[in-house]
Image (cartoon, rainbow, N blue to C red):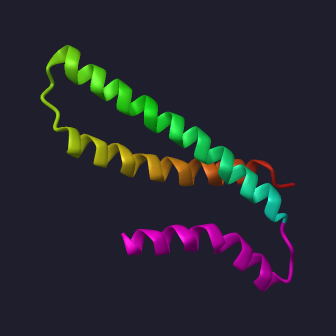
């Protein structure tokens, strides 16, 4: 858990550190807003994935274990948040 926190915080600070090394300033408000928006999108994707997997498990008797399914979907949700945040942050650059 601690390792994942270190990786995520390093990812979020990567752009600021690179800009400071180059002597540039970046717009922090735009970057924060893009990651907030990415968080909302990732949350709704995560919720929809959980609902779809639960409904598919009940309708088709797939025999999925709930704890394993939730862990896999949460893992995918974190990576979708990072990827969507990177995309939205890159999309706003000039």
Q: Is residue 88 left or right of residue 60?
A: right
Q: How many callouts does the rendering have?
A: 0
23 or 46, which lies in front?
46
- Name above or below for residue 49 compared with residue 5: above
Start-end of magenta stretch: 1-26
Q: Residue at x 59, y 39 (%)?
A: 41
Task: State the image quarter where residue 82 is shown.
Answer: bottom right
In which quadrant is the N terminus drawn?
Answer: bottom left
Q: Position of residue 68 (x, y in %)?
A: 21, 45
Q: Is residue 65 left or right of residue 43?
A: left
Q: Is residue 52 magenta?
A: no
In which quadrant is the C terminus drawn?
Answer: bottom right
Q: Residue at x 80, y 50 (%)?
A: 92
Q: Is residue 27 left or right of residue 68?
A: right
Q: Position of residue 71 (x, y in %)?
A: 29, 49
Q: Position of residue 22 (x, y in %)?
A: 81, 82
Q: Residue at x 26, y 21 (%)?
A: 56
Q: Residue at x 65, y 73 (%)?
A: 13
73 or 19, which lies in front?
73
Q: Position of residue 89 (x, y in %)?
A: 72, 53
Q: Residue furthest top?
A: 59
Principal secondary structure, stretch drawn in magenta: helix
- Name above or below for residue 63 compared with residue 4: above
36 or 90, which lies in front?
36
Q: Is residue 3 magenta?
A: yes
- Name above or below for residue 80 compared with residue 4: above
């Amino acid at each position: 858990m601690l390792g994942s926190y270190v990786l995520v915080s390093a990812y979020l600070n990567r752009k600021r550190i690179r800009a400071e090394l180059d002597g540039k300033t970046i717009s922090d408000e735009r970057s924060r807003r893009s990651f907030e928006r990415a968080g909302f999108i990732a949350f709704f994707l995560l919720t929809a994935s959980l609902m779809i997997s639960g409904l598919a498990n009940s309708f088709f008797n797939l025999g999925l274990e709930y704890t394993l399914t939730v862990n896999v979907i949460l893992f995918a949700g974190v990576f979708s948040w990072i990827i969507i945040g990177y995309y939205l942050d890159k999309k706003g650059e000039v």
